[in-house]
Structures are given as structure tokens and as C-alpha cells.
Image (tube, grey):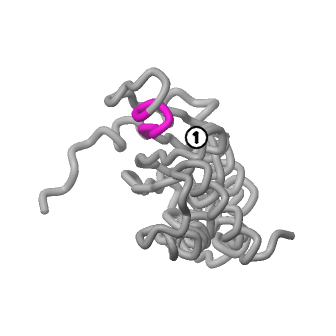
């Protein structure tokens, strides 16, 4: 395992590669700041999905769609170490247990705060819902813009990538999928 000091030295080496002078006043504390920020940005590696989704409640017979939409997230592309950000829509249909709504946002954060690709985040959230809640169905839809497409390569500023994972009734039944899409597309509440 790499130590914090070794990681800071690696950042200093990158600064030398980029600028040639990592001892410039504005860069002296940059390795520490970068590693501090990495500890926050990549905190998902310290989180356990079973623990995040363990706090459940009796569904009391509720058998409709539970949807938390427009969950903002930021992640880092594992291919170019560029940021990507977007919003996730997470839904499930409970059997006997429901989970607190903040846990749905936390499970998105768990996956987003790792080196990622969008497809893996989408699949991982759906897998965690299935494995921990055993719902009738789960659905995850993610829309995101990617820094690796905006600031390098094809330089497309407005491209949005959408991924989805549909499980159980959301995969098997058109009616459930259609109802979910209507809920996601409904106008936001007036604030």
C-alpha cells in the first residue's frame, strides 16, 4: 500500500513533469492539497453498500414505485482522470422493506466517489439495490457530461451520456417501465 508521503511525492513528480518547477510558491503545498482532495473525492472506497442500505423500515404494504430523482453527483473517469458529473434517478418497488431516502443518495455517492465509468456506476447501484433490498424491481438511470469529452479529444461541450439498468419488473413489464419514465419526466415541484 502506498503511503500518504509517497502519494504526495508522486504529485510533486507530476508537477515537475507539467511545469518543471514544483517549488514555485503557488505549488509548494499543492501535493498536500491534492492528496487531501483525493481523500474526499475517492471516499467511496471506504464505504460499504451493505452498511449504507442496512437501515430499512417495514413497507407497511406499500407496493408502488419509490423514486429519488435528480440526485446530483460528481465522479472521476478512470480512463483520463477527468471529472464527470450528472444526475441519477434511482427507483425500486419494495416487497417488505423500504430504505430511508438519504440512503438512495448515499449509494449513488458511494459509487461516484471512486475511479469510475458511467456504466459501472449504473450497474453497481442497481446490483446493490437488488442484493440488499430484494425489491420487485429496481431501476437506475444516469445522465452525465464528461470532462474527457469536453476539454480534450472531440471537445463536445453539450454531449450528455445516458445509461440505464432495469431489473425485475422494470425489465420485464413495459407498464412499470413506462410509469417510471413518466415519474422521472414530470415537472419539478415549484420552489
Report how many numbered discs are placed on residues in the image.
Answer: 1
Question: Which residue is more in the foreground, 38 or 162?
Answer: 38
Q: In the image, which residues are magenta?
A: 143-151
Quadrant for the C terminus, please.
bottom left
Disc 1 marks which residue?
Answer: 118
Question: Which residue is more in the foreground, 180 or 144?
Answer: 144
Question: Which residue is more in the foreground, 84 or 173?
Answer: 84
Residue 13, horizontal then vertical, whole percent: 67, 58
Helix, strand or loop for disc 1:
helix
Which quarter of the figure has residue 45? bottom right
Residue 166, horizontal then vertical, whole percent: 60, 37
Which residue is pictured at 32% across the width and 29% down the height?
Answer: 158
The answer to whether 183 appears left or right of 154 in the picture is left
Q: Residues within 10 Å of mark 1 (few under 14, many from 20)?
A: many
Q: Is 9 drawn above or below residue 5 in the view shown?
A: above
Name, please, the residue furthest toward the top. Answer: 154
Which residue is pictured at 41% across the width and 56% down the height?
Answer: 71
- Can residue 144 be found in the magenta stretch? yes
Amino acid at each position: 500500500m502506498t503511503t500518504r508521503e509517497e502519494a504526495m511525492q508522486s504529485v510533486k513528480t507530476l508537477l515537475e513533469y507539467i511545469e518543471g518547477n514544483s517549488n514555485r510558491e503557488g505549488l509548494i503545498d499543492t501535493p498536500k492539497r491534492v492528496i487531501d482532495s483525493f481523500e474526499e473525492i475517492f471516499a467511496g472506497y471506504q464505504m460499504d453498500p451493505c452498511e449504507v442500505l442496512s437501515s430499512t423500515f417495514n413497507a407497511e404494504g406499500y407496493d408502488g414505485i419509490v423514486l429519488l430523482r435528480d440526485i446530483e453527483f460528481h465522479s472521476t473517469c478512470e480512463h483520463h482522470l477527468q471529472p464527470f458529473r450528472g444526475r441519477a434517478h434511482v427507483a425500486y418497488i419494495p416487497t417488505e422493506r423500504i430504505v430511508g431516502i438519504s440512503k438512495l443518495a448515499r449509494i449513488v455517492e458511494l459509487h461516484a466517489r471512486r475511479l469510475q465509468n458511467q456504466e459501472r456506476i449504473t450497474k453497481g447501484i442497481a446490483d446493490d439495490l437488488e442484493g440488499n433490498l430484494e425489491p420487485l424491481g429496481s431501476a437506475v438511470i444516469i445522465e452525465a457530461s464528461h470532462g474527457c469529452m469536453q476539454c480534450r479529444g472531440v471537445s463536445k461541450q453539450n454531449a450528455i451520456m445516458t445509461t440505464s439498468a432495469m431489473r425485475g419488473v422494470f425489465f420485464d413489464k413495459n407498464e412499470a417501465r413506462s410509469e417510471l419514465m413518466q415519474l422521472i419526466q414530470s415537472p419539478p415541484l415549484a420552489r
